[in-house]
Image: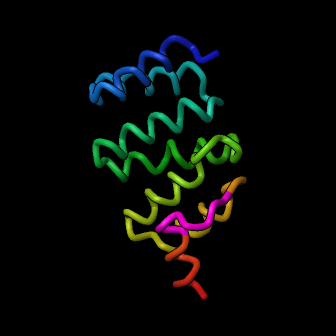
Amino acid sequence: MLPTVLQQGQSAFRCEGLAEAERLFAEAVRSWPMSAVAHKWLGMTYAAEEKFVLAEAPFRRACEIDRNEPEACYYWGRTLFSLSRFEAALQAYEKDAKPRRGKTCSEWLLRWRH
């Protein structure tokens, strides 16, 4: 079961209350620093706000904590790709415990590298 602050953050995120979602997810990360879910949602909020530089660290942390957290490593790679950090993006995609072919950026990077 998700802690209440995460549920509130997800609700704010879905209703496009991104500033409130950012505040709630930042609180969740402070309260549960080993929660890949909290870090991932904070990164998602930053990305939705087009704050890609800020999104990188929470996505990286989520991937480091639990590479099985759905999409955490992929979102980290997408963020790095958005920042034109292509080699780092490929390395993040490679950490994904459940890589899926057909994800635009990862496929492009794999072709680019070889």
- Residue 56 in the image: above or below residue 77: above
Find the residue positioned furthest to the front.
102
Which residue appears at 55% of the width and 83% of the height? 111
Picture quarter containing residue 16? top left
Spot occupied by residue 11 in the image (x, y as percentages of width and height): 39, 20
**Camera-nearest residue between 61 and 110:** 110
Instruction: Name the image quarter holding the N terminus.
Output: top right
Instruction: Name the image quarter holding the C terminus.
Output: bottom right
The answer to whether residue 19 shows anywhere in this view is no
**Camera-nearest residue between 14 and 37:** 14
Which residue appears at 65% of the width and 30% of the height? 34
Which residue appears at 34% of the width and 22% of the height? 12
The answer to whether residue 103 shows anywhere in this view is yes
Spot occupied by residue 38 in the image (x, y as percentages of width and height): 54, 30
**Camera-nearest residue between 51 and 98:** 98
Spot occupied by residue 47 in the image (x, y as percentages of width and height): 36, 46
Find the residue positioned furthest to the top.
4
- Residue 75 in the image: above or below residue 38: below
Picture quarter containing residue 79? bottom left
Q: Is residue 95 magenta?
A: no
Q: Main secondary structure of the magenta part?
A: loop
Question: Which residues make up the magenta segment?
Answer: 99-106
Picture quarter containing residue 88? bottom right
